[in-house]
Image (cartoon, helix red, strand yellow):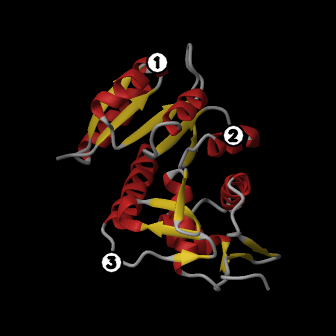
């Protein structure tokens, strides 16, 4: 069955261009000219991905991302004419997996869509049944769940698809240091055009959630290089 993608943009020509390129790659597409009907249709059709504009009448793309993240970790790609750094960071904070600025290359958008699906599908087709742990975190790969351990009890933590993939990669490669570029290419199979700040933004968001959950697990910054996680304090 082809993967279903919601395209939410108030510009009809943008929606039609995206639809055309996606359907050429055998994806199924549903179009929406505003966020509210897309949100209403989400639970009924259970799309595999959303491509969302920011500036729309009524509910904004940011608000839609926030509402979706309350109920599901479906991948989200934001496309927007707004190119301010604050907007990009806010998009990541709201749980978007990618942020593309208009005008964009439809072929690049399709490449990002495929990269996200390769990442998600690859994580679902686990090569091992192992349930990796680090400090007080445990990961259930086949269920894409992260829990905090407290004796015999477990508390599930909520992460977006992109955040989950980062944590899983770091935990399964603990005690190793990775540069930002290595993380971008190894985890998400995509080279951000020199913009490694996306990794920093992602780490900040994950750290905020870890702090709120009061976990012993932490992501260490290796200044001038990148990031690592370890089993214990150094």
Query: Residue furthest toward the right?
Result: 223
Marks 3 and 2 sit apart, C-alpha to C-alpha, by: 34 Å
Most extreme residue toward the top is 58
Comes first in the chain, label 2 or label 1: 1
Point 55% across, 50% down: residue = 158
Q: Quadrant of the C terminus?
A: bottom right
Q: Which secondary structure, mark 1?
A: helix
Q: Which residue is mark 2?
A: 90
The first of marks 3 and 2 along the sequence is 2
**Mark 3, residue position:** 127
Can residue 43 be seen by looking at this rendering?
A: yes
User: What percent of the width, then of the height, locates residue 190?
Assistant: 50, 63
Judge the density around disc 2: few (<14), some (14-19), many (≥20) Cα neighbours within 10 Å. some
Left or right, residue 192 beside residue 21: right
Mark 3 lies on a secondary structure that is loop
* Residue in the image at 75% along x and 73% along y: 220
Q: Residue at x 55, y 44 (%)?
A: 96
């Amino acid at each position: 069955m082809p993967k279903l993608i919601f395209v939410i943009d108030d510009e009809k020509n943008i929606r039609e261009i995206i639809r055309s390129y996606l359907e050429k790659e055998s994806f199924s597409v549903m179009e929406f000219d505003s966020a509210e009907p897309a949100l209403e249709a989400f639970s009924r059709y259970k799309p595999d991905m959303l491509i969302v504009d920011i500036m729309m009448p009524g509910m904004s793309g940011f608000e839609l991302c926030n509402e979706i993240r309350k109920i599901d970790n479906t991948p989200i790609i934001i496309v927007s004419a707004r190119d301010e750094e604050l907007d990009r960071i806010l998009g990541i904070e709201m749980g978007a997996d990618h942020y593309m600025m208009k005008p964009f290359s439809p072929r690049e958008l399709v490449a990002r869509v495929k990269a996200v699906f390769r990442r998600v599908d690859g994580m679902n087709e686990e090569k091992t049944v192992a349930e990796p742990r680090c400090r007080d975190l445990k990961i259930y790969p086949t269920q894409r769940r992260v829990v905090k351990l407290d004796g015999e009890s477990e508390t599930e933590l909520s992460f977006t698809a992109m955040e989950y993939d980062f944590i899983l990669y770091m935990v399964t490669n603990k005690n190793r240091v990775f540069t930002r570029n290595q993380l971008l290419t190894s985890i998400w199979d995509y080279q951000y055009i020199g913009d490694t700040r996306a990794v920093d933004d992602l780490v900040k968001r994950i750290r905020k959630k870890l702090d709120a959950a009061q976990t012993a697990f932490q992501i260490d910054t290796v200044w001038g290089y990148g990031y690592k996680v370890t089993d214990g304090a150094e």
